[in-house]
């Protein structure tokens, strides 16, 4: 007789998620909330119509287990890619300031006609990045092993 495997016996795999609609994007937005990244890790490739950011993502999917087991909170390097980008604009982001570190608070999709719209990345400190897209196509892929969060704490937001 065999028994079913338990969750604890499973190995955690890196995330690799895609979003083609607003509901999918809400999942990715929740997972990248409180990610931090230097401005130097932003890449806009107009010929490929691709915008990408290499994030230091807090592992929200592990936060509850870390609390219960008394483990360290973790972050992981993740690649956030938005395809079908026609235009990029920003507010409160100076790409010449190589020491600038940004904190991502939210990602939203503002639909327009025929599947086109705006992907809006809201940053702490009143910053924002606006991506005009022909169609919504966003991917999030973990690219490193998780590491101990330098602060040792989970991010908190005032109520």
Image (cartoon, rainbow, N blue to C red):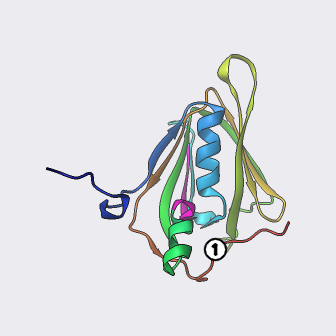
For residue 157, above or below residue 92: below
State the image coordinates of residue 64 (x, y, percent, origin top left).
56, 67
Q: In this view, does 112 lie to the left or right of 44?
A: right
State the image coordinates of residue 154 (x, y, percent, origin top left).
63, 74
In the image shown, does 60 or 98 lie closer to the viewer? 60
Task: Identify the secondary structure beneath mark 1.
Answer: loop
State the image coordinates of residue 99 (x, y, percent, origin top left).
66, 75
Q: Residue furthest left?
A: 1
In the image shown, does 119 or 89 lie closer to the viewer? 119
Q: Quadrant of residue 117?
A: top right
Q: In which quarter of the image is residue 51?
A: top right
For residue 134, above or below residue 100: above
Q: Residue at x 53, y 59 (%)?
A: 61
- The question of residue 95 being in magenta is answered with no
Magenta: main secondary structure: strand
Span colored in magenta: 51-61
Q: Which residue is drawn at 56% across and 31% down?
A: 20
In the image shown, does 157 or 54 lie closer to the viewer? 157
Q: In this view, does 87 lie to the left or right of 45?
A: right
Q: Mark 1 points at which residue?
A: 154
The quadrant in which the C terminus is found is: bottom right
Q: Residues within 10 Å of mark 1 (few under 14, many from 20)?
A: some
């Amino acid at each position: 007789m065999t028994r079913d495997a338990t969750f604890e016996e499973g190995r955690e795999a890196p995330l690799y998620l895609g979003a083609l609609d607003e509901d999918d994007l809400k999942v990715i937005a929740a997972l990248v909330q409180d990610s931090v990244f230097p401005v130097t890790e932003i890449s806009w490739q107009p010929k490929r119509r691709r915008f990408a950011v290499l994030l230091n993502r807090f592992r929200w999917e592990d936060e509850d287990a870390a609390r219960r087991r008394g483990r360290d909170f973790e972050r992981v390097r993740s690649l956030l890619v938005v395809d079908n980008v026609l235009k990029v604009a920003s507010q409160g982001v100076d790409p010449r300031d190589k020491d600038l570190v940004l904190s991502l608070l939210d990602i939203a999709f503002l639909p327009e006609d025929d599947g086109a719209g705006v992907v809006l990345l809201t940053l702490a400190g009143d910053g924002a990045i606006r991506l005009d897209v022909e169609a919504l196509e966003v991917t999030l892929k973990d690219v490193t092993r998780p590491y101990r969060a330098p602060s040792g704490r989970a991010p908190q937001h005032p109520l």
